[in-house]
Each structure stands twice: as C-alpha cells, then as structure tokens.
Image (tube, rainbow, N blue to C red):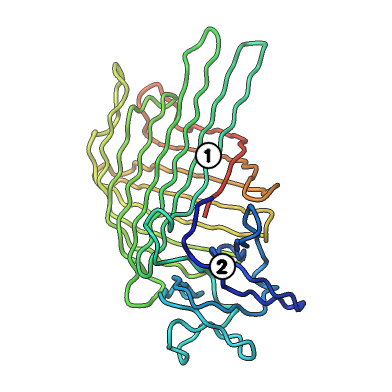
Amino acid sequence: MYASSRLNTDIVFMKNGDKITCEIRSLDQGQLTIKQDYANSTVVLDWDKVDHIETHQPFVIVDSKGNASSGALSESPDKRIVSVGEDEKNGIAHGDVVSIQQTGETFIHRLRGNIDLGTSFAQSNSQKNLTLQSDLTYQATTHYFSLSSSTQFTSQQKTNNTSETTVKSEYFKQLRNSNWYSGAIANFLSSSEQQIDLRTTLGAALAVRPIYTNKTNLSFIGALAYTNEKDASNTISRTSTNSFDAAAAVQYATFRFDSTSFDTTLWVYPSLTSPGRVRMTLNQDIYFKFYRDFYFRASFYDNYDNRPVVGAPSNNLGMSSTVGWSFR
C-alpha cells in the first residue's frame, strides 16, 4: 500500500448503524476500501451495505453510465444522493455509483493494479514453468488507461525452451458524457511456439460500454490497426510482414464481493490486406481473494492464426495458476 497525505476525517455510515471514521481510498467492483489511522492495513466494505458517506475531500467519481466528475463529495442520508462539489441537482444515486478514486495527489497514487507469480517443477523430466502476470489501470475524469502483460516460460530436458509473452494496452477518452469512447490500442505478442519474435499491432479505436455496474462490466471495441510481424529466423511466412487489419474485442467481467472475479477478453483481427486471414486471442482469468489484497488466479489463453508460419501450429493454448497481490 502507499503512504497517503489525505486526512482520516471521512465518515462511513453502515446500514446496521455502525459509524466508521477513516480515509476513503477507493470504490471498485462494489468494494469500498478504507484506511483507519489506528490500523496497519486497509479494510474492504460492501458498498451495498453502506448507507451513506460523509467527506469533504476531492475524488473522481464515475456512475453506471460512465460519466465521471471530480470534486469534493457529499451524500445526504435521507435521499442517498452523492453530490460532487456544490452541484446537488445533478447528484448520483448511491446505487449508481460504480467507482470512487482519490484525486488531488500524484499520478502514481491514482494507479490501480495487481501482479502475480506462479512456478511449477516436475522431477521426472526436469520441467520448470514460470508465469508472471500484471495489470495496471488509471482513471481520470474523462480519460482511461489500462496495461496488461503475461509471460510464461518453460524449460525441459532434451527439448527446446519455450516462452510466450503478451502485452495489451488501451487509452480512451470519453465522448460528450456518453458511454462511447475514442482512443488507441497497442498490442504485442512474442511466441516461440508459433515462431513469432514480435508481432506489433497499433490502431485507432472506438469503444462502447453498455453495461457498467458494481457487479458486471461489458465493453465492445472496434479498431483499424497496422500490424508488423517479425518471425523467427529461418522460417517461412505465409503472409506479408506488414498489414492493415480490422480489430474487434469483447471484454466482460463479473464480480462477487471480496471473493471471486471472472474476466474474459476476446480479440479478433480479420486482415484487410490479406483477405481470408484471421487472428484471434482469448484470455480467461478467474480471481479468488483469500486474504486482504492477496489472491489466487487461474488463467487460460489461446492465440490463433489461420495462416501461421510454415510448420508452426495454428493454435497456441496454455493454462497457469498464480498467487498475486493487488494495490489501489
């Protein structure tokens, strides 16, 4: 966690009558994270069980339509409407508040993310596996940025070592207080199994977020992208190393308070300059929080290319289990 310069003067009123004086850190996935000045670690509260909050410190708050506002928060206990600044007429109903993030501090303090690691070893063939994954997000009033990476390395006797690395990043800006966003994508893939040294995809994108709640998020992305492929040496490619592609993605996440989360991301890349060629990446992650900010993560991925390098498989599938830590 981080050292905060904010005051521990926020008050959270629970539906059961409890009153907690604290520092409100964030609201995300239906979990209100707070820090009490006499506690060594943060505490997570169920937003559905919070009656109302009282604070005069600045935050970025996002509602279920994706609209974001910045300013000091106040909430009336009778109407349960969260107001930003002095604007009481355009307040947000308590149940429609999806995200609350601290503002007024440094860029680093606004970042949220997680990192996890997994290893395994088989004595029979000296097979060793190492998996490292991470995610990073930043939410401002009208801007959103995310970065995710995954690396898997396998070594085994009497066979070549294999590695798989993917990096996906997105930057979006909200369009006129709607659930539409414009921005850019940058995706990278390196796979020894499919004999790809580096595949780079850069594009301009539009995104829409039709469902955005404390329980479920659903987003669609469409893009036009430029792809450059550098295959492994001494390989024969079936397509051009430079191409223009269409790109489409579905991102779905569902949460259960303080326990389990399911994240699914599907990207499809039909080529515009090589008709008939289609690439796809699928990532499925299941998170189970077992202690404070620590969690187990089970992951499945599939990288597909219907015109791979000659001699390489069309599909490259993998699974991993890791232990990680999240910060916000």
Q: Percent x, y for residue 270?
A: 35, 47
Q: Nearer the viewer, mark 2 or mark 1?
A: 2
Q: Is residue 89 left or right of residue 290?
A: left
Element at badge 1?
Answer: strand
Q: Which mark is residue 61?
A: none
Residue 172 vertical position relative to residue 114 in the rendered view, above or below: below
Q: How many marks?
A: 2
Q: Is residue 267 left or right of residue 291?
A: left
Element at badge 2?
Answer: loop
Q: Percent x, y for residue 74?
A: 52, 82
Question: How would you rate the neighbour count of disc 1 (Cα within 10 Å): few for under 14, some for 14-19, many for 20 or more?
Answer: some
Amino acid type, residue under disc 1 in the picture: Tyr
Residue under label 1, please give it.
301
Q: Which mark is residue 8?
A: 2
Residue in the image at 47% along x and 17% along y: 161
Residue in the image at 46% along x and 37% along y: 303
Amino acid type, residue under disc 2 in the picture: Asn
Q: Percent x, y for residue 314?
A: 44, 32
- Viewer-proximal residue among 53 and 246: 53
Q: Is residue 230 left or right of residue 210?
A: left
Residue 165 vertical position relative to residue 25 in the rendered view, above or below: above
Residue 23 vertical position relative to residue 17 in the rendered view, above or below: above
Image quadrant assignment for residue 81: bottom right
Question: In terms of sequence position, does the residue under pointer 2 or pointer 1 come before the other?
Answer: 2
Residue in the image at 43% along x and 33% along y: 165
